[in-house]
């Protein structure tokens, strides 16, 4: 199991946790919209670090983005396995061809 899979399992396990004792549970209790908002905030912070060129800060912000993505997905009951299946289905297809095939 990868660290991302372990993190996704932890996020899933926190769905029923006490929001006073778990940041993940607190985010999930605030609803999918708040989870999406927080993901967006973290994505912007990663963009800022990418522009600045600080590799260590970008890696840290990217980790935050991945965590908050998993929380946002969990808020809508979308699993990491579902996302990975989409990526696997796209594997070997050029991005240009994949986008053209969307309609």
Image (cartoon, grey):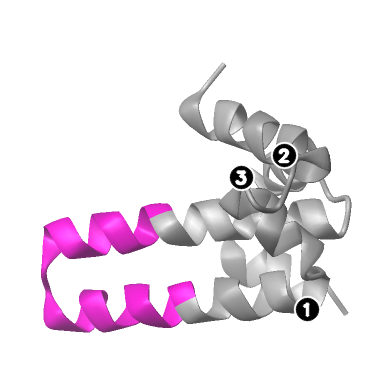
Nearer mark to the viewer, of 3 and 2: 3
Q: Earlier in the sequence, mark 3 or mark 1?
A: 3
Q: Earlier in the sequence, mark 3 or mark 2?
A: 2
Residue 63 placement, left or right of 11: left
Q: Which residue is mark 1?
A: 33
Cα separation between marks 2 and 1: 18 Å
Snapshot quadrant of residue 42: bottom left
The answer to whether residue 47 of the structure is visible from this angle is yes
Tell me the SS state at disc 1.
helix
Cα separation between marks 3 and 1: 21 Å
Q: In the rendered image of this protein, does residue 52 appear above or below residue 78? A: below
Residue 15 placement, left or right of 51: right
The residue lying at 26 percent from left, 55 percent from top is: 59
Q: Which residue is mark 3?
A: 21
Label 1 crowd bin: few (<14), some (14–19), many (20+), radius 10 Å: some
Q: Position of residue 38 (x, y in %)?
A: 58, 74
Residue 71 placement, left or right of 66: right
Label 2 crowd bin: few (<14), some (14–19), many (20+), radius 10 Å: many
Q: Quadrant of the N terminus?
A: top right
Q: Is residue 7 magenta?
A: no
Tell me the SS state at disc 3.
loop
């Amino acid at each position: 199991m990868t660290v991302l899979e372990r993190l996704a399992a932890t996020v899933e396990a926190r769905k029923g946790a006490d929001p006073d004792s778990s940041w993940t549970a607190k985010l999930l209790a605030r609803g999918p919209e708040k989870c999406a908002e927080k993901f967006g905030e973290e994505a912007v912070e990663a963009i800022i670090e990418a522009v600045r060129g600080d590799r260590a800060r970008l890696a840290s912000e990217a980790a935050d983005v991945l965590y908050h993505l998993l929380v946002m997905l969990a808020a809508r009951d979308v699993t990491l396995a579902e996302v990975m299946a989409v990526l696997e289905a796209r594997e070997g297809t050029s991005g240009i061809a994949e986008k053209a095939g969307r309609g």
